[in-house]
Image (cartoon, coloured by chain):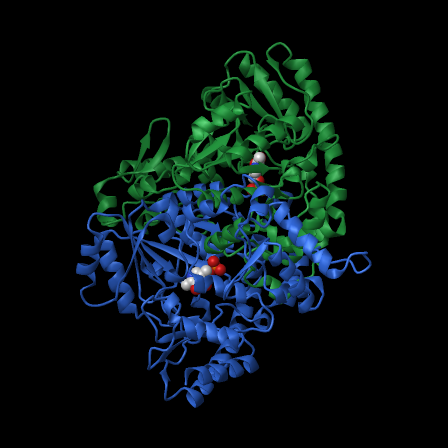
Chain colours: A green, B blue
Amino acid sequence: MSWKPNRSSHLTMQEQIIDWVKSRIDKGEWTVGTKLPPQRSLASQFNVNRSTVQLALDELKASGLLHTRAGSGVFVANNSWNILLNNNQPNWHRHIESGIHKPNYHTIQLINEYEQQEGIIRLGTGELSPDLLPTEQIKDSLSEIQLESRAIGYSSPLGNEKLRNVLCTYLKKRDIHTEPDNILIVSGALQALQLISFGLLEQGSVVFQEEPSYLNSIHPFQSSGMRVTSITKELKLKEILKEQKRNRQSLYYAVPTLHNPTGRNWTLEEKERLYDVCKELQIPIIEDDVYHELLFEETYPAMKSFDTSGQVLYLGSVSKTLSPGLRIGWVVAPTPVIHHLADIKMQTDYGSSAFSQEIVAHWISSGMYEEHVSKLRARLKERAAFTEAILEEQFKDTATWEKSEGGFYIWLRFNEPVVNKALFLNLINRKVLINPGYIYMPSDLHHIRLSYAYASLKDLKEALGILKELIS
Amino acid sequence: MSWKPNRSSHLTMQEQIIDWVKSRIDKGEWTVGTKLPPQRSLASQFNVNRSTVQLALDELKASGLLHTRAGSGVFVANNSWNILLNNNQPNWHRHIESGIHKPNYHTIQLINEYEQQEGIIRLGTGELSPDLLPTEQIKDSLSEIQLESRAIGYSSPLGNEKLRNVLCTYLKKRDIHTEPDNILIVSGALQALQLISFGLLEQGSVVFQEEPSYLNSIHPFQSSGMRVTSITKELKLKEILKEQKRNRQSLYYAVPTLHNPTGRNWTLEEKERLYDVCKELQIPIIEDDVYHELLFEETYPAMKSFDTSGQVLYLGSVSKTLSPGLRIGWVVAPTPVIHHLADIKMQTDYGSSAFSQEIVAHWISSGMYEEHVSKLRARLKERAAFTEAILEEQFKDTATWEKSEGGFYIWLRFNEPVVNKALFLNLINRKVLINPGYIYMPSDLHHIRLSYAYASLKDLKEALGILKELIS
Ligand SMILES: Cc1ncc(COP(=O)(O)O)c(C=O)c1O
Ligand SMILES: Cc1ncc(COP(=O)(O)O)c(C=O)c1O
């Protein structure tokens, strides 16, 4: 368990805290430059008053072990005592700075961090709220899982065979007719992007995306040295793609159904046109279809359903429908591509959790999955309507939006360019966390990606009130 | 479900198979150059005689759709019909060839492939045999897992908090005193290597390893452009490391306890010397400690236990002890390093399976884990003794080996350089799969990594008999 001062020690709380901080520096766990957790978190970890923590830190600062950087927190100081103690520490800072994979944008790191905090209202989270997750049913279903010893060993390269078979049947409903050896099980759709990035592109390849794009909020392509280029689906699509691609390798990343962050659906013509152009230019397409089960009305055909040339790499996942904690997704692609991606996956993590795979196979094959998703759609629809009513009441004069067709998001556009980092930070101060548009399109200061899927209705209402207040 | 011909169709089996193959080519699932599965597998998938498959394939060859490459199988032909059909297929071959992440060595791909086949005896597999896995107990324990809705959502960057707390207590027994924010949960130790490779090294960095090394059988460092250099732990260690490193970034990868593939344990002096030298040269050390629970006798202190400078990145895993299908491992390192690796993990797969994490937390905290591991050690010890007795009887004149001190492996050394790819392939023909030494040390033609952990005792005996026969 996390360390706590001992109330029956002969040392005071404050002395014990000082010793503990010293020992962490001493052991090299907190290296020079490490930022300490906020006093608030330390106080709650130690189960003491904030003032006790403050006094301990003050003493450590006085002795030169820690120092405050105005506005950004308390850090392990680069003083002679620390250096003496940890002489010849590896230069972790240099290691971190020079790593190939770049850190997330600061705003996204803050989002990841604050999402963990109690008491904050998450107005942008792309995730089902705890009460929409079928937690109890999943728990009950665990007893029905058939675990075989072979299944809990290292996985076969393509993933659990039962699950791949089940998916073949399931995908038929989306009019995708495929075979188990055209399916690779991955640890979520995000991992598929990572594998495609490392496995199918050389450095300097061009990755086309829509604008705004989910890809801007993650870095699978950027981190492996690809050039990511935003394309608007306009009339001269072919000329533009051709010119940008030249003779480089390339790939088009699309979320044609319930797009993240805009919630938009492409028309069938848009899909056909992209498919035809990419086919002519030999540009493979990633069709990221993780939200399609959440369409409120009729479903739109997937590009993969009319792909006759093995052009489309199709991605699915249970993260948006059943549980992101399962970390299960899939790629459908031509056999040689699947085998190559599987080979790389084996080198990366030796396959996905066998337990998660068994759970998903059981849920889909038993029909529980579709039954759950159909109820889920109804509840999301209610949440969308609730949120739209608030918007109508409170934001009609300052913003515009489209009625949601499904999924989680409303792409709220403010008339004025008010959605900047200051707004983001001010909202955090008021315990509201948003996903600002600029993480999906760097130049954008107009949009917020509202999610009606995560916060409780009460919280949604309250947070939108705070948002309105700060905007005006 | 996988496609099968329909026995009540008006078409013959053979005609249906032909149509099916055509449709797979037609849809672009089997692109030009795709290798078809062996006739044997097709026959068993279709539930028909091999001769039916043969006739169907012959007809497809006659029409120019398929062609045979002598000795390597049947492929989708690059003929005009296919090209016409799939006109403008993406050049997947070029994509695969030029990807950044390189394919596994051919021998390792074959091992991954043949491990999935029924009826083959796996003499080298680094994995617990199905009867050593506590499958039933894990299944029973599922009902005791406390699933909370928060826990099955997207994970916090460092991983399940309960599990990190449990690990702090668990690691104390290994004399490693740490805190939850110095621990990152990963999808197996292999993923940790991948994250370290992308997160903490620049291209062209030097990764030192022992010779032979597990690292040669996987490519996490090579694929991201690191120079991997084998080092023998000789007297001039410091001079050699210094010279090879120059002013490049570097890292030392070590498996000091029950080394893979040799099974060796470093002495305390060897560990201290490496630690001191690396500290002086500021070379971080990866201490891969995934086998330590399987030491038959007393345990040797981990380097991490005397690390006072945050020099050592310590790796653990439940793959070798509880179940590799869980895909759960951990890294212990200084806080800034952990936070950086966690950030990259979030960009890679948004965290490890929440279910797997809950299962491991439950097993370790309840004491079931240690109880199981202690029984497991006893059973592995029996298996080691059984295998050593066969070696003594059959290989005394042709090979040497050391008595196993724990884990899975015996590093069997033949007096003559007989362990080449031909032997590997000949053994496959006899339904025996080995891990030849050359996948751990390319120039080595003397060794086999025997594993007494996977095959049944009967199979072990039989396969060793076949090995002896082929060697002489
Ligand atoms: C469009 C899109 N693709 C992929 C993902 C990642 O999904 P997974 O949890 O399956 O990795 C998300 C989740 O945010 C998403 O919005
Ligand atoms: C030394 C060593 N490290 C790491 C691993 C990978 O373990 P995991 O299944 O935890 O990724 C293995 C497994 O073969 C191993 O032998």
Q: Residue furthest front?
A: B62
Picture coordinates of residue A80, whole percent (x, y): 21, 42
Q: Position of residue B63 (x, y in %)?
A: 62, 54
Let me know if residue A373 appears in the view.
yes
Total marks in image = 0
- For residue B321, above or below residue A427: below
Q: Nearer the viewer, residue A233 or B336?
A: A233
Residue B293 against residue A64 in the figure, above or below = below
- Quarter occupied by residue B409: bottom left
Q: Residue at x 55, y 30 (%)?
A: A277
Give percent across and percent down for residue B268.
30, 68
Residue A27: image location, x then y, percent: 32, 52
Residue A409's image quarter? top right
Identity of the residue drawn at 46% across and 20% down: A443
Left or right relative to B296: residue A378:
right
Nearer to us in this view, B23 or A408: B23
Ligand 1 sits in quadrant: top right
B14 vs A77, left or right, is right
Residue A144 can be seen, yes or no: no
Foreground residue among A168 and B400: A168
Image quadrant in which the C terminus of chain A is located: top right
Residue at image position (30%, 50%) is: A26
Name the residue furthest top: A397
